[in-house]
Image: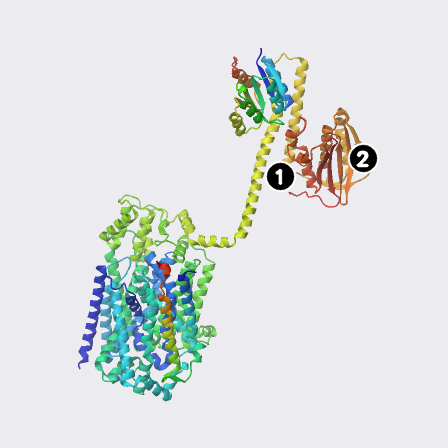
């Protein structure tokens, strides 16, 4: 059974590109366009890794991250925050809330793939 | 009896007694059992005020001016109650600053100005020397009368013998002053021996005068009733009982009262006794009433003696100034005459001794030392000996000067009023001192200007005038004015003939002095040292006992160098002692190479001030301290600590209401600023986000296209079109951000002209026609097709219309969308309403949709189109036209965006 | 008001009072050819008031200062 990735972002084009990239790596992919949808998806079925955008309607990425980390059942879920606000504070906040890594938009696709693979313990090529 | 030789011997014997008294006083002081630390001794020492001029001259003045001699004593009486404040304050300041003369006091107050100290000293010497000469004359003349024991010799004519006596008297006094006034150099400059001797002399002169008064009133006559009865009966004397006898009348009475009020404190000998020799401020309490009582006693018998002399020596040509001596001779009481002579000698010697000691300190510290120390930069030798020698020389010089002056004008009448001339001279110091201790604004240049102005007037109206009276200069100087300038007549400046000469001089000199002083001070800028000294003086009570000089020196000097400097002036042993005392007190580690802390430097400066005066002390300290003399922070610290700040805060307190209001305003402004700052930060962060989002898609898909060459054509095209769309969005966003920034910073250019609203609607509709068709949204344009003229920027208005139309297309019902355009009118405005039939906007969001980037996170459905800046820009544009834009909505039934523009007013195109 | 300040105010008032009493026009009132116990009125007034002034000064000045301790 392939590892599953949940992509949560409110920009449809970004979701589209991420979906393409992850599927190409052989992961199963689910998508969500706001915070609540992302949480519902997690409740439905736990993903192995979440690509989580910070600025989303309804519930933002920080809240989602916090809720995931508050649930002991989901402690093994890897979270990579995607942030478009360039400030250090945002990144630090993400890490503080329990994210495993963060990626600043616009990101290098190769680097993102590398990060996802390493985090899931898969062999990866240095970008 | 052979008075020829007995009188001089007795004089010498009396002086010997004085030496013993003074020696005893000094010894007791050395043993630490001070005799002088006593309020009565202090009071008696102040009585140095009563000189031979008072002793002999009062009776003389009474014979021609009735009670006119009294103001000399009434002035001190009237001001004595005020000693509790101003004298106490002067003493406190003088002790803290180790000030030892009036010149030093003034110099220290005005930024330790050497020029001011020197000036005051010069003026004092000029004003006081005639007064000293007067004492010598009194001694010489009285001795002459005593030797002859003949009332007929008391005519005031001089003989060579008298001149010789005067000379020897001067020598004796110089010797005394040198022995007890300059025995050692001491930081406090106190001389207990002299104080004790003067107190002793004060008892002698008063005692003798009272005995004489009783003898004249009850021995020669039958009591007061008898004396006054005879006087009232005699038409030649009767007028003396009247106030009309007072020369110059009430004006002169008042002027002389004022002058003596000043003189009792500011005459150098008075300052020496009252301030420098003061041991405890508690002593002022007794002095304030006992001294006036002393004066009262001294004056009690003046009129009876004067009347008695007038009656007894009527028509004999006896000098009234010598009545006190002639009357006991007439009564065949030779021993009483001798006592009277001794009393006069007491009055003269105490005055001369104290005056010369005080003057020698001033001349050496404020005139010669500053020049000497400036001319020589290094001193290897012990200077204390040099300074002592210098002072001794000065004393001899001063007395010789007094003697010469006496010889020069001995026979003239100039001496008669010389006391008052001296009083008027020292009164010139009053403004500098009074304003100096109560007004921080009094400046150095003001003090110098005031003193010079006052002294010029004094010199002209009193000194030169008295020279003219005694024939030294042409009498026309008095009658026609100098160079024939009538308005400069010394007794009628500017034609003011209302006053007697003394009142005239007092009025003009004090007016010039105070006027120039205050005027300059008001427009002057004080230096840092001046400001510090002003605060130290004015606020002396608010500061600790040692004042706030600690921060004055910030440069570097080693303890060794500092001690060496001190040792040169007070001797190595004494310097060692002072240093170890100070170190012990302040828990200081001593060491020659250790840098001195600022307070140690200030301490040494104070010690030196006592010895060589403040100006010279400053010069000496600055010669060893390397680096900045005064640092800005130090000054600020002192300024902060002073009560000026306290006073300021008190003033603020009284304005607390205003302050609170101001504070609140400030807080509001601050909060607003913080909010603005936060908003700006937020804006940048949001812009960053908005720019990065399309960039992310563009980069991601570009990389996907780049890395996956074997993509299917359809997929490839899909990705490419996304890139293009996102690029367009990015471009639009950048343009709008720039637009907004331009509008908000006021840099947008506006082209206002007559525009037709209908035409604008038409152009906007044309521009959005494609959008309507693509989304199959129906457009209902209800704007009438006729001219609706407005003053506006055409392109900007079209931009608003397009924006609102494309928004309406975006948000209208996706199934059968309808957008309506209507004309809106109000009495003074006209505009458009653009109405859609979409889901509507919640009431609370109606205003917020105009905020930047509002839609991005808050729209009910995800609408990736748009930048979130369109409505914000619309609002800015409409506001620039003095118009209004707002939204109305019913949830589920659609939204109307309405804007109205005023018909008439010119649009506000300036910056907001 | 501290006792010190009260004393100060009294002394200032005393001085002002004295200056008025020892000057025109008050002096002129006593400037008459009259005698009291054989002594001219002006002298009586001047010396009498002088003594009064000294006594008042002493009374005010000698009042113990409570705030001194």
Residue shown at 26% from the left, 72% from the top: B203
Q: How is the image coloured?
A: rainbow
Image location of residue B710, percent across then percent down: 63, 11
Circle 1 crowding by C-alpha within 10 Å: few under 14, some 14–19, many from 20: few
Image location of residue B172, percent across then percent down: 22, 69
Secondary element at image label 1: helix
The tally of labels here is 2
Quarter assignment of residue C67: bottom left
Q: Is any atom of residue B379 visible in this view? A: no
Quarter assignment of residue B717: top right
Q: Quadrant of the N terminus of chain B?
A: bottom left
Quarter assignment of residue B294: bottom left
Residue highlighted by disc 1: B745
Image location of residue B530, percent across then percent down: 40, 55
Residue shown at 54% from the left, 19% from the top: A73
Whether labels 2 and 1 share one chain: yes
Q: Give yes or no for contact between labels 2 and 1 (Cβ–Cβ under 8 Å).
A: no
Image location of residue B504, percent across then percent down: 43, 73
Report the side of B521 relative to B379 (left or right): right
Report the side of B192 relative to B834 (left or right): left
Report the side of B900 relative to B249 (left or right): right
Q: Is any atom of residue B726 visible in this view? A: yes
User: Looking at this rendering, what residue extends furthest in the top direction?
Assistant: A1
Secondary element at image label 2: loop
Residue highlighted by disc 2: B782
Q: Distance between the Cα atoms at labels 2 and 1?
A: 36 Å
Q: Quadrant of the C terminus of chain B?
A: top right
Circle 2 crowding by C-alpha within 10 Å: few under 14, some 14–19, many from 20: few
Q: Is residue B219 above or below residue B89?
A: below
Q: Is residue B352 above or below residue B561?
A: below
Mark nearer the viewer, 2 or 1: 2
Check the residue under mark 1 and report the chain it is in: B
């Amino acid at each position: 059974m392939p590892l599953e990735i949940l992509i949560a972002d409110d920009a449809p084009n970004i979701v589209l590109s991420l979906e393409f990239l992850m599927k190409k790596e052989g992961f199963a992919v689910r998508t969500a366009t706001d915070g609540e949808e992302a949480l519902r998806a997690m409740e439905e079925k736990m993903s192995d890794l979440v690509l989580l955008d910070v600025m989303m309607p309804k519930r933002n990425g920080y809240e989602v991250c916090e809720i995931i980390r508050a649930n002991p059942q989901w402690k093994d879920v890897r979270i990579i925050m995607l942030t478009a606000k360039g400030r250090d504070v945002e990144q630090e906040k993400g890490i503080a809330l329990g994210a495993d890594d963060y990626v600043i938009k616009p990101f290098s696709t190769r680097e993102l793939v590398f990060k996802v693979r390493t985090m899931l313990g898969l062999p990866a090529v240095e970008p | 009896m052979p008075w020829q030789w007995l009188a001089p011997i007795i004089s010498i014997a009396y002086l010997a007694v004085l030496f013993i008294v003074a020696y005893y006083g000094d010894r007791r002081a050395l043993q630490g059992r001070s005799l002088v630390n006593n309020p009565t001794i202090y009071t008696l020492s102040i009585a140095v005020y009563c000189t031979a001029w008072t002793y002999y001259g009062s009776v003389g003045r009474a014979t021609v001016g009735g009670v006119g001699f009294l103001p000399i004593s009434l002035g001190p009486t009237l001001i004595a109650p005020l000693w509790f404040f101003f004298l106490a304050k002067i003493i406190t300041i003088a002790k803290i600053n180790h000030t030892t003369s009036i010149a030093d006091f003034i110099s220290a107050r005005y930024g330790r100005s050497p020029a001011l100290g020197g000036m005051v000293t010069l003026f004092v010497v000029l004003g006081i020397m005639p007064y000293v000469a007067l004492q010598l004359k009194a001694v010489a003349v009285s001795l002459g009368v005593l030797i002859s024991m003949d009332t007929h010799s008391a005519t005031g004519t001089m003989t060579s013998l008298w001149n010789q006596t005067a000379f020897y008297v001067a020598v004796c006094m110089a010797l005394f002053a040198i022995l007890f006034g300059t025995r050692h150099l001491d930081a406090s400059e106190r001389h207990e021996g002299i104080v004790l001797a003067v107190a002793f002399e004060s008892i002698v002169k008063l005692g003798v005068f009272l005995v004489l008064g009783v003898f004249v009133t009850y021995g020669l006559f039958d009591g007061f009733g008898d004396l006054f009865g005879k006087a009232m009966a005699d038409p030649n004397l009767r007028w003396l009982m009247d106030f009309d006898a007072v020369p110059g009348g009430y004006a002169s009475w008042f002027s002389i009262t004022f002058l003596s009020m000043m003189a009792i404190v500011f005459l150098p000998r008075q300052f020496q006794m009252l301030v420098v020799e003061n041991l405890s401020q508690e002593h002022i309490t007794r002095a304030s009433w006992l001294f006036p009582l002393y004066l009262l006693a001294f004056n009690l018998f003046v009129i009876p003696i004067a009347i008695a002399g007038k009656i007894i020596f009527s028509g004999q040509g006896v000098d009234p100034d010598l009545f006190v001596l002639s009357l006991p001779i007439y009564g065949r009481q030779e021993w009483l005459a001798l006592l009277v002579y001794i009393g006069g000698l007491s009055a003269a010697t105490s005055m001369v001794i104290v005056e010369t000691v005080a003057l020698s300190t001033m001349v050496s510290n404020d005139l010669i030392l500053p020049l000497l120390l400036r001319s020589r930069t290094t001193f290897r030798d012990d200077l204390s000996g040099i300074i002592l020698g210098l002072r001794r020389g000065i004393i001899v010089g001063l007395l010789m000067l007094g003697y010469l002056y006496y010889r020069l004008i001995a026979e003239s009448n100039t001496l008669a009023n010389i006391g008052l001339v001296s009083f008027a001279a020292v009164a010139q110091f009053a403004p500098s001192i009074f304003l100096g201790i109560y007004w921080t604004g009094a400046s150095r240049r003001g003090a110098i200007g005031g003193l010079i102005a006052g002294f010029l007037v004094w010199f002209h109206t009193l000194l030169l005038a008295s020279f003219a009276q005694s024939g030294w200069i042409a009498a026309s100087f008095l009658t026609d004015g100098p160079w024939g300038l009538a308005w400069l007549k010394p007794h009628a400046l500017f034609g003011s003939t209302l006053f007697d000469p003394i009142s005239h001089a007092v009025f003009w000199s004090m007016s010039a002095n105070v006027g120039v002083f205050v005027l300059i001070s008001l427009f002057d800028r004080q230096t840092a040292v001046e400001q510090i000294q002003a605060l130290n003086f004015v606020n002396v009570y608010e500061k600790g006992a040692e004042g706030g000089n600690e921060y004055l020196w910030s440069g570097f000097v080693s303890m060794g160098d500092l001690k060496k400097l001190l040792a040169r002036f007070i001797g190595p042993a004494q310097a060692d002692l002072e240093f170890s005392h100070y170190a012990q007190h302040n828990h200081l580690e001593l060491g020659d190479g250790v840098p001195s802390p600022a307070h140690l430097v200030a301490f040494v400066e104070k010690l030196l001030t006592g010895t060589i005066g403040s100006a010279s002390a400053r010069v000496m300290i600055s010669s060893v301290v390397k680096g900045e003399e005064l640092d800005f922070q130090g000054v600020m610290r002192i300024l902060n600590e002073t009560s000026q700040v306290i006073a300021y805060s008190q003033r603020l307190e009284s304005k607390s209401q205003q302050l609170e209001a101001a504070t609140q305003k400030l807080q509001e402004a601050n909060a607003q600023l913080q909010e603005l700052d936060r908003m700006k930060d937020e804006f940048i962060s949001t812009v960053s986000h908005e720019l990065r989002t399309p960039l992310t898609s563009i980069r991601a898909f570009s990389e996907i296209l780049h890395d996956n060459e074997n993509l299917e054509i359809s997929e490839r095209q899909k990705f490419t079109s996304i890139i293009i769309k996102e690029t367009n969005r990015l471009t639009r966003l950048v343009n709008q951000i720039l637009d907004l920034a331009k509008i908000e910073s006021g840099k947008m250019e506006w082209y206002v002209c007559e525009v037709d609203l209908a035409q604008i609607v038409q152009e906007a509709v044309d521009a959005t026609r494609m959008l309507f068709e693509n989304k199959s949204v129906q457009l209902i344009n209800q704007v009438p097709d006729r001219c609706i003229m407005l003053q506006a920027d055409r392109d900007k208005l079209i931009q608003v219309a397009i924006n609102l139309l494309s928004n309406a297309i975006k948000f209208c019902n996706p199934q059968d969308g309808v957008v309506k355009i209507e004309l809106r009118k109000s009495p003074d405005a006209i505009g458009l309403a653009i109405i859609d039939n979409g889901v509507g906007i919640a009431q609370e969001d109606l205003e917020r949709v105009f905020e930047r980037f509002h839609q991005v996170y808050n729209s009910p459905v995800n609408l990736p189109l748009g930048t979130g800046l369109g409505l914000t820009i619309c609002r800015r544009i409409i506001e620039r036209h003095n118009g209004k834009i707002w939204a109305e909505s019913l949830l589920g039934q659609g939204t109307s965006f309405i804007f109205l523009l005023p018909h008439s007013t010119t649009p506000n195109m300036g910056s907001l | 008001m501290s006792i010190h300040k009260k004393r100060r105010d009294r002394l200032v008032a005393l001085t002002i009072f004295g200056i008025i009493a020892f000057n025109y026009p008050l002096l002129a009132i006593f400037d008459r050819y009259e005698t009291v116990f054989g002594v001219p009125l002006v002298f009586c007034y001047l010396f009498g008031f002088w003594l009064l002034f000294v006594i008042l000064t002493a009374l005010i000045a000698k009042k113990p200062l409570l705030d001194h301790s």
